Image (cartoon, helix red, strand yellow):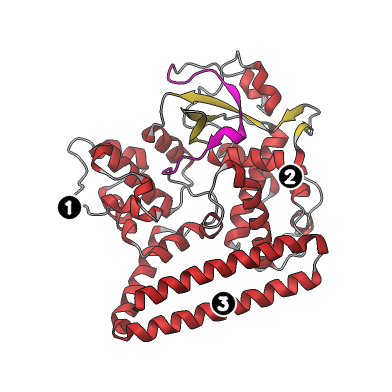
Amino acid sequence: MSSRDRRRHIRNTDNLLVSNPNAVDPKTVDAIGFGLGSLSEEIAAADSEFQAIEAVSIDKIYPNAIQPRNSVPHDITDVFPLIPENVVAIFERWIIEVQLETGQKDFDIKSYLQGAATERGEQAETFDGQDIAEQAPLPKEHSLMKLIDLAASIRRDGLSNPITLAHRQRRYEIETGERRWLAYHILYWQFGDGDRRPDGSIANWSRIPSRAVKQVDVWRQASENNARDNLNAISRARQLSILLMDLHGWENFSGRDAFAGEQEFYAQVADGGAWRVPRGKGEQLLNAMGLSNAGQLRQYRALLRLPGNLWRKGDDENLTEGELRKMKAALDTVTGVTVAGGKRQQQDAIARLTAAAADLQRKLRKEIDAGDSSARPKLRKLIRTQINQLISLEDEIEDASS
């Protein structure tokens, strides 16, 4: 994708309100100073459900625990829950993992955000139209660069689509706009307040233009997701689960806090016989999901029953529903053949974890020996975190085999 196409894609998805054009109340001139684009002066508010725009501190905003999209890889949020005080640590960890994933020595995030010279930019500039071997994007690098590209777009063009928030006691909960909120965190982390944008205007990234809503509306949330049409298969399964719970009444289900794993929460409606689509609501559900037939609803509901590791893999790697279905079928075949060797499998799994730990140690040692001394504390922290994760996994395997 060319730089121009990438910018157009970002404008048309994450940075523009494509599902509801009533984006900005013209009274909110102060919000422009916090990065809101000039589009705010051209669009009038007409939806009484939303209050006027205000610039809200990014540190008072929290993600919605059950929203469909997962913006950060699972193994990072396992260590650092996605809350405001952890966001910088999340991005520092994420960058280190991208460096390990790609073999990069440096990751100059500011050059990406400023649109300065970068290696990928040089590759685009020197491309001569000849066929070149395409390299599949690596999962962590791909997901991080999408957020960085969004942040760069906001810094360059302004935020055309304020996020929507529901007030929860002394803090706010995101209804729509988690990725835009993360992009503001990136910009504040790298530039602080008083940043001079490319057009010469000054932006304060510590506060993000937002509209208040009375409460999080899962159907409005689905409408925006559907309009963008960029949810992966696992996110669509989450979206379906949330809408079904809403149709059947939230009082019939346990809250997210009742479950150790997030998949277990969504899987409460995995049984299509027990939780049918209510009569008269089928068209509403298909429309909100952006699906054309009931068969697709069944396919996405089936994903709620995936093994946990496949669920996480599908989410982090943006696998399609068809790819996940094939992988599940292959896994079922292998499981059917090997189920009798349960104890030996547990021992093999422990051996694989030990090998993985040793391999990780070698990679990190290489980085420490070759790297800047100032980066070593971060790498040591990553080593300790990974060891704790491996110990936790080993304990789980021991418990299962006992």
As shown in the figure, which amino acid type bears the numbered disc 3? Ala
Q: Which mark is residue 119?
A: none
Residue to which mark 2 is pinned: 113
**In this view, which residue lies farthest toward the top?**
27
* Residue 162 rendering spot, x and y as whole percentages: 57, 29
Give the residue displayed 41% in from the left and 28% down from the top.
215
Marks 1 and 3 sit apart, C-alpha to C-alpha, by 41 Å
Q: What is the CA distance from the residue labelled 2 to the residue labelled 1?
A: 49 Å
Residue 135 visible in the displayed image:
no
Total number of numbered discs in the rendering: 3
As for residue 350 lying within the magenta part, the answer is no
Q: Amino acid at mark 1?
A: Gly
Q: Amino acid at mark 2?
A: Leu
Q: Quadrant of residue 337?
A: bottom left
**SS at mark 2?**
helix
Which residue lies under the disc numbered 1? 273
Residue 108 lies left or right of residue 169; in this view the side is: right
Give residue 178's position: percent from left, percent from top. 53, 40
**In the image shown, does 146 or 87 lie closer to the viewer?**
87
Tag nearer the camera, 1 or 3: 3
The residues colored magenta run 48-67
Residue 125 pos. (x, y %) = 78, 54
Of residue 344 and residue 37, the one placed in the foreground of this image is: 344
Label 2 crowd (10 A; few <14 / some 14-19 / many >=20): many
Residue 57 forms part of the magenta stretch: yes
Secondary structure beneath disc 1?
loop
Location of residue 89 in the rendering, given as x and y in whole percent from the top left corner: 65, 51
Check disc 3 and report the residue beneath it.
Answer: 356
